[in-house]
Amino acid sequence: MIDLANIVAIDVHTHAEVSCRQPHDNYRPEFDEAFAKFFKSSHRPTIQETCDYYRTLKMAFVMFTIDAEFELGRKRIPNEEVAEEAMKNSDVMIPFASIDPHKGRMGAREAKRLIDDFGVKGFKFHPTVQGFYPNDKMAYHLYEVIAGAGLPMLFHSGHSGFGSGVRGGGGLRLEYSNPIHLDDVAIDFPDVPIIIAHPSWPWQDEALSVAMHKPNVYIDLSGWSPKYFPPQLVQYANTQLKNRMLFGTDFPLITPERWLKDFESAGFKEEVKSLILKENAITLLKLK
Ligand SMILES: [Zn+2]
Protein backbone atom coordinates (compact mmCIF):
# COMPACT_ATOMS: atom_id res chain seq x y z
CA MET A 1 0.00 0.00 0.00
CA ILE A 2 1.17 3.48 -0.82
CA ASP A 3 1.27 5.74 2.24
CA LEU A 4 -0.52 8.66 0.60
CA ALA A 5 -0.05 11.03 3.52
CA ASN A 6 3.72 10.66 3.50
CA ILE A 7 4.67 10.64 -0.14
CA VAL A 8 5.57 13.92 -1.80
CA ALA A 9 4.51 13.06 -5.36
CA ILE A 10 3.22 10.44 -7.77
CA ASP A 11 5.10 10.19 -11.04
CA VAL A 12 2.60 8.85 -13.61
CA HIS A 13 5.14 8.18 -16.38
CA THR A 14 8.24 6.01 -16.01
CA HIS A 15 9.64 3.32 -18.28
CA ALA A 16 10.76 -0.23 -17.71
CA GLU A 17 13.83 -0.19 -19.94
CA VAL A 18 15.54 -3.42 -19.05
CA SER A 19 14.33 -6.90 -18.26
CA CYS A 20 15.95 -9.15 -15.70
CA ARG A 21 14.27 -12.16 -17.27
CA GLN A 22 15.42 -11.98 -20.87
CA PRO A 23 18.38 -10.47 -22.72
CA HIS A 24 18.04 -7.14 -24.54
CA ASP A 25 16.72 -7.79 -28.05
CA ASN A 26 19.31 -6.14 -30.23
CA TYR A 27 17.15 -6.25 -33.35
CA ARG A 28 17.59 -2.93 -35.24
CA PRO A 29 20.34 -1.50 -32.98
CA GLU A 30 20.26 1.77 -34.95
CA PHE A 31 17.30 2.74 -32.77
CA ASP A 32 19.27 2.35 -29.55
CA GLU A 33 22.26 4.24 -30.92
CA ALA A 34 20.16 7.20 -32.12
CA PHE A 35 18.16 7.16 -28.89
CA ALA A 36 21.26 7.37 -26.71
CA LYS A 37 22.49 10.27 -28.84
CA PHE A 38 19.16 12.13 -28.80
CA PHE A 39 18.81 11.90 -25.03
CA LYS A 40 22.54 11.94 -24.26
CA SER A 41 22.04 8.93 -22.04
CA SER A 42 22.31 5.19 -22.27
CA HIS A 43 21.90 4.13 -18.64
CA ARG A 44 19.04 1.69 -18.20
CA PRO A 45 18.19 0.98 -14.56
CA THR A 46 16.45 -2.25 -13.55
CA ILE A 47 12.92 -2.09 -12.17
CA GLN A 48 14.20 -2.84 -8.68
CA GLU A 49 16.78 -0.05 -8.91
CA THR A 50 14.01 2.34 -9.90
CA CYS A 51 11.89 1.25 -6.91
CA ASP A 52 14.79 1.78 -4.52
CA TYR A 53 15.51 5.20 -5.96
CA TYR A 54 11.90 6.42 -5.74
CA ARG A 55 11.64 5.09 -2.20
CA THR A 56 14.51 7.33 -1.11
CA LEU A 57 12.67 10.29 -2.69
CA LYS A 58 9.39 9.38 -0.93
CA MET A 59 7.65 9.17 -4.28
CA ALA A 60 5.32 6.65 -5.87
CA PHE A 61 5.40 5.99 -9.61
CA VAL A 62 3.58 4.36 -12.49
CA MET A 63 5.75 2.15 -14.70
CA PHE A 64 5.18 0.44 -18.04
CA THR A 65 6.96 -1.15 -20.93
CA ILE A 66 6.04 -0.62 -24.59
CA ASP A 67 4.85 -3.51 -26.70
CA ALA A 68 5.50 -2.53 -30.32
CA GLU A 69 6.27 -5.97 -31.68
CA PHE A 70 4.27 -5.48 -34.88
CA GLU A 71 5.88 -2.19 -35.97
CA LEU A 72 9.41 -2.68 -34.62
CA GLY A 73 9.73 -6.44 -34.79
CA ARG A 74 11.45 -6.26 -31.45
CA LYS A 75 10.65 -8.48 -28.48
CA ARG A 76 8.92 -6.66 -25.65
CA ILE A 77 9.77 -6.64 -21.96
CA PRO A 78 7.13 -8.86 -20.30
CA ASN A 79 4.14 -7.09 -18.72
CA GLU A 80 4.17 -9.86 -16.11
CA GLU A 81 7.65 -8.84 -14.98
CA VAL A 82 6.53 -5.23 -14.47
CA ALA A 83 3.41 -6.34 -12.59
CA GLU A 84 5.26 -8.81 -10.36
CA GLU A 85 7.92 -6.24 -9.45
CA ALA A 86 5.07 -3.90 -8.51
CA MET A 87 3.60 -6.55 -6.20
CA LYS A 88 6.96 -6.79 -4.42
CA ASN A 89 7.24 -3.00 -4.20
CA SER A 90 3.63 -2.02 -3.65
CA ASP A 91 4.60 0.85 -1.34
CA VAL A 92 6.02 2.80 -4.31
CA MET A 93 5.12 1.19 -7.62
CA ILE A 94 1.89 1.12 -9.68
CA PRO A 95 1.95 -1.19 -12.71
CA PHE A 96 0.56 -0.28 -16.13
CA ALA A 97 0.67 -2.72 -19.03
CA SER A 98 1.29 -2.25 -22.75
CA ILE A 99 -0.18 -4.43 -25.47
CA ASP A 100 0.31 -3.88 -29.18
CA PRO A 101 -3.14 -2.96 -30.60
CA HIS A 102 -2.31 -5.03 -33.68
CA LYS A 103 -2.85 -8.08 -31.47
CA GLY A 104 -6.59 -7.42 -31.73
CA ARG A 105 -8.81 -9.82 -29.85
CA MET A 106 -5.84 -11.86 -28.65
CA GLY A 107 -4.45 -8.67 -27.13
CA ALA A 108 -7.81 -7.99 -25.50
CA ARG A 109 -7.67 -11.42 -23.86
CA GLU A 110 -4.18 -10.67 -22.60
CA ALA A 111 -5.37 -7.35 -21.16
CA LYS A 112 -8.14 -9.11 -19.28
CA ARG A 113 -5.70 -11.63 -17.83
CA LEU A 114 -3.25 -8.90 -16.78
CA ILE A 115 -6.04 -6.99 -15.04
CA ASP A 116 -7.59 -10.00 -13.32
CA ASP A 117 -4.49 -12.00 -12.40
CA PHE A 118 -1.73 -9.41 -12.19
CA GLY A 119 -3.52 -6.31 -10.90
CA VAL A 120 -2.39 -3.88 -13.59
CA LYS A 121 -3.88 -0.43 -13.04
CA GLY A 122 -3.79 1.12 -16.51
CA PHE A 123 -2.45 0.82 -20.06
CA LYS A 124 0.17 2.69 -22.04
CA PHE A 125 0.05 3.27 -25.80
CA HIS A 126 2.63 4.78 -28.13
CA PRO A 127 0.94 5.50 -31.48
CA THR A 128 4.19 6.38 -33.29
CA VAL A 129 6.22 3.40 -32.13
CA GLN A 130 3.26 1.01 -32.28
CA GLY A 131 2.29 2.32 -35.73
CA PHE A 132 -1.44 2.99 -35.35
CA TYR A 133 -3.97 5.79 -35.18
CA PRO A 134 -5.51 5.81 -31.69
CA ASN A 135 -8.98 6.11 -33.25
CA ASP A 136 -8.45 3.01 -35.42
CA LYS A 137 -11.18 0.49 -34.58
CA MET A 138 -8.49 -2.19 -34.55
CA ALA A 139 -7.53 -0.92 -31.08
CA TYR A 140 -11.09 -0.92 -29.77
CA HIS A 141 -11.02 -4.61 -28.75
CA LEU A 142 -8.37 -3.60 -26.26
CA TYR A 143 -10.05 -0.33 -25.21
CA GLU A 144 -13.31 -2.15 -24.46
CA VAL A 145 -11.61 -4.44 -21.94
CA ILE A 146 -9.85 -1.48 -20.32
CA ALA A 147 -13.09 0.51 -20.21
CA GLY A 148 -14.90 -2.46 -18.71
CA ALA A 149 -12.39 -2.51 -15.86
CA GLY A 150 -12.64 1.27 -15.34
CA LEU A 151 -8.90 1.78 -15.88
CA PRO A 152 -7.04 4.71 -17.46
CA MET A 153 -5.27 4.71 -20.84
CA LEU A 154 -2.12 6.76 -21.37
CA PHE A 155 -1.02 7.78 -24.89
CA HIS A 156 2.32 9.15 -25.95
CA SER A 157 1.80 12.40 -27.85
CA GLY A 158 3.89 14.74 -29.98
CA HIS A 159 7.45 14.29 -31.18
CA SER A 160 9.15 11.00 -30.49
CA GLY A 161 12.73 10.66 -29.31
CA PHE A 162 12.52 7.08 -30.50
CA GLY A 163 13.52 7.02 -34.16
CA SER A 164 14.85 10.61 -34.05
CA GLY A 165 17.85 10.86 -36.35
CA VAL A 166 17.51 7.35 -37.73
CA ARG A 167 17.40 7.14 -41.53
CA GLY A 168 13.78 7.81 -42.54
CA GLY A 169 12.93 8.03 -38.83
CA GLY A 170 13.20 4.23 -38.83
CA GLY A 171 9.88 4.22 -40.68
CA LEU A 172 8.06 5.67 -37.65
CA ARG A 173 5.27 8.18 -38.34
CA LEU A 174 4.98 11.24 -36.10
CA GLU A 175 1.47 12.03 -37.20
CA TYR A 176 0.02 9.04 -35.34
CA SER A 177 0.89 10.91 -32.13
CA ASN A 178 -1.08 14.06 -32.89
CA PRO A 179 -3.35 14.26 -29.81
CA ILE A 180 -6.31 15.37 -31.94
CA HIS A 181 -6.93 11.67 -32.74
CA LEU A 182 -7.66 11.14 -29.04
CA ASP A 183 -10.72 13.35 -29.40
CA ASP A 184 -12.48 10.44 -31.14
CA VAL A 185 -11.40 8.00 -28.43
CA ALA A 186 -12.71 10.36 -25.74
CA ILE A 187 -16.07 10.45 -27.52
CA ASP A 188 -16.29 6.68 -27.89
CA PHE A 189 -15.08 6.01 -24.31
CA PRO A 190 -16.44 9.02 -22.38
CA ASP A 191 -15.96 7.42 -18.97
CA VAL A 192 -12.39 6.20 -19.48
CA PRO A 193 -9.67 8.50 -18.18
CA ILE A 194 -7.41 9.30 -21.13
CA ILE A 195 -3.97 10.72 -20.42
CA ILE A 196 -2.19 12.67 -23.15
CA ALA A 197 1.46 12.20 -22.29
CA HIS A 198 4.04 14.99 -22.60
CA PRO A 199 3.85 18.55 -23.87
CA SER A 200 2.56 17.52 -27.31
CA TRP A 201 4.95 19.58 -29.42
CA PRO A 202 4.31 20.40 -32.27
CA TRP A 203 0.63 19.95 -31.32
CA GLN A 204 0.35 21.56 -27.90
CA ASP A 205 -2.78 23.52 -28.73
CA GLU A 206 -4.57 20.41 -30.01
CA ALA A 207 -3.88 18.68 -26.68
CA LEU A 208 -5.21 21.63 -24.68
CA SER A 209 -8.29 21.87 -26.86
CA VAL A 210 -9.13 18.17 -26.49
CA ALA A 211 -8.63 18.36 -22.70
CA MET A 212 -10.76 21.51 -22.46
CA HIS A 213 -13.55 19.89 -24.45
CA LYS A 214 -13.55 16.36 -23.03
CA PRO A 215 -13.67 16.14 -19.22
CA ASN A 216 -12.19 12.61 -19.19
CA VAL A 217 -8.92 13.81 -20.74
CA TYR A 218 -5.80 14.51 -18.67
CA ILE A 219 -2.31 15.73 -19.58
CA ASP A 220 0.91 14.41 -18.08
CA LEU A 221 3.84 16.79 -17.93
CA SER A 222 6.56 14.23 -18.56
CA GLY A 223 9.39 14.09 -21.04
CA TRP A 224 10.45 17.72 -20.84
CA SER A 225 12.01 19.88 -18.20
CA PRO A 226 9.31 22.34 -17.02
CA LYS A 227 11.79 25.06 -18.02
CA TYR A 228 10.88 24.45 -21.66
CA PHE A 229 7.10 24.07 -21.34
CA PRO A 230 5.13 26.18 -23.84
CA PRO A 231 3.53 29.16 -22.02
CA GLN A 232 -0.03 28.11 -22.87
CA LEU A 233 0.51 24.76 -21.16
CA VAL A 234 1.51 26.48 -17.92
CA GLN A 235 -1.35 28.95 -18.28
CA TYR A 236 -4.01 26.21 -18.58
CA ALA A 237 -2.39 24.21 -15.77
CA ASN A 238 -2.80 27.26 -13.54
CA THR A 239 -6.46 27.77 -14.48
CA GLN A 240 -9.10 25.72 -16.32
CA LEU A 241 -7.13 22.45 -16.41
CA LYS A 242 -5.63 22.54 -12.92
CA ASN A 243 -7.46 19.35 -11.90
CA ARG A 244 -6.28 17.44 -14.97
CA MET A 245 -2.55 18.02 -15.11
CA LEU A 246 -0.27 15.29 -13.80
CA PHE A 247 3.33 15.13 -12.69
CA GLY A 248 5.37 12.73 -14.79
CA THR A 249 9.03 12.52 -15.70
CA ASP A 250 9.66 9.90 -18.40
CA PHE A 251 12.29 8.43 -16.09
CA PRO A 252 15.01 7.33 -16.73
CA LEU A 253 15.24 10.07 -19.40
CA ILE A 254 14.51 12.80 -16.87
CA THR A 255 14.99 12.29 -13.14
CA PRO A 256 12.34 13.47 -10.68
CA GLU A 257 15.02 15.54 -8.94
CA ARG A 258 15.78 17.51 -12.09
CA TRP A 259 12.09 17.88 -12.99
CA LEU A 260 11.09 19.13 -9.53
CA LYS A 261 13.93 21.60 -9.38
CA ASP A 262 12.88 23.18 -12.69
CA PHE A 263 9.16 22.99 -11.75
CA GLU A 264 9.77 25.41 -8.87
CA SER A 265 10.58 28.30 -11.16
CA ALA A 266 8.45 27.46 -14.23
CA GLY A 267 5.55 29.78 -13.43
CA PHE A 268 3.12 27.38 -11.74
CA LYS A 269 0.92 28.84 -9.02
CA GLU A 270 1.67 27.65 -5.51
CA GLU A 271 -1.88 26.32 -5.00
CA VAL A 272 -1.82 24.11 -8.12
CA LYS A 273 1.53 22.49 -7.38
CA SER A 274 0.16 19.91 -4.94
CA LEU A 275 -2.68 19.11 -7.38
CA ILE A 276 -0.20 18.41 -10.15
CA LEU A 277 2.31 16.54 -8.00
CA LYS A 278 -0.07 14.28 -6.14
CA GLU A 279 -3.77 15.04 -5.70
CA ASN A 280 -4.85 14.75 -9.34
CA ALA A 281 -3.10 11.37 -9.66
CA ILE A 282 -4.74 10.10 -6.46
CA THR A 283 -8.15 10.87 -7.96
CA LEU A 284 -7.34 9.53 -11.42
CA LEU A 285 -5.80 6.28 -10.16
CA LYS A 286 -8.51 5.88 -7.51
CA LEU A 287 -5.89 5.47 -4.80
CA LYS A 288 -8.37 6.46 -2.10
ZN1 LIG B 1 7.54 7.97 -22.11
Image: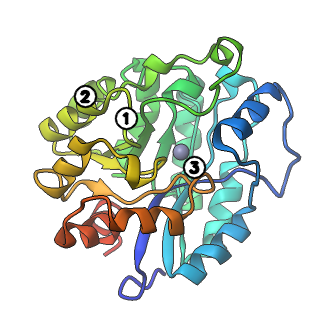
SS category of the residue bearing label 3: helix
Tell me if label 1 and label 2 are in contact, CB under 8 Å.
yes
Between marks 2 and 3, how big is the CA–CA gap?
34 Å
Q: Position of residue 175 (x, y in %)?
A: 44, 17
The amino acid beneath tag 1 is: Ser
Residue position marked by numbered label 2 in the rendering: 206
Q: Residue at x 56, y 38 (%)?
A: 109
Q: Which mark is residue 113?
A: 3
Mark closer to the chain start, 1 or 2: 1
SS category of the residue bearing label 2: helix
Q: Residue at x 42, y 30 (%)?
A: 158
Q: Position of residue 243 (x, y in %)?
A: 19, 59
Mark closer to the chain start, 2 or 3: 3
Which one is in front in this view, the residue at disc 3 or the one at disc 1?
1
Residue position marked by numbered label 1 in the rendering: 200
> How many neighbours does mark 1 have within 10 angstroms: few (below 14), some (14-19), or many (20 or more)?
many
Q: Is residue 10 left or right of residue 32?
A: left
Can residue 74 be seen here? The reply is yes
- Hey, which quadrant is residue 269 in on the image? bottom left
Q: Is residue 274 above or below residue 230?
A: below
Residue nearest the viewer, comparing 195 with 265: 265
Residue nearest the viewer, comparing 32 with 288: 32
Q: Is residue 11 left or right of residue 241?
A: right
Q: How is the image coloured?
A: rainbow
Q: Position of residue 277 (x, y in %)?
A: 34, 68
Q: Is residue 255 left or right of residue 71?
A: left
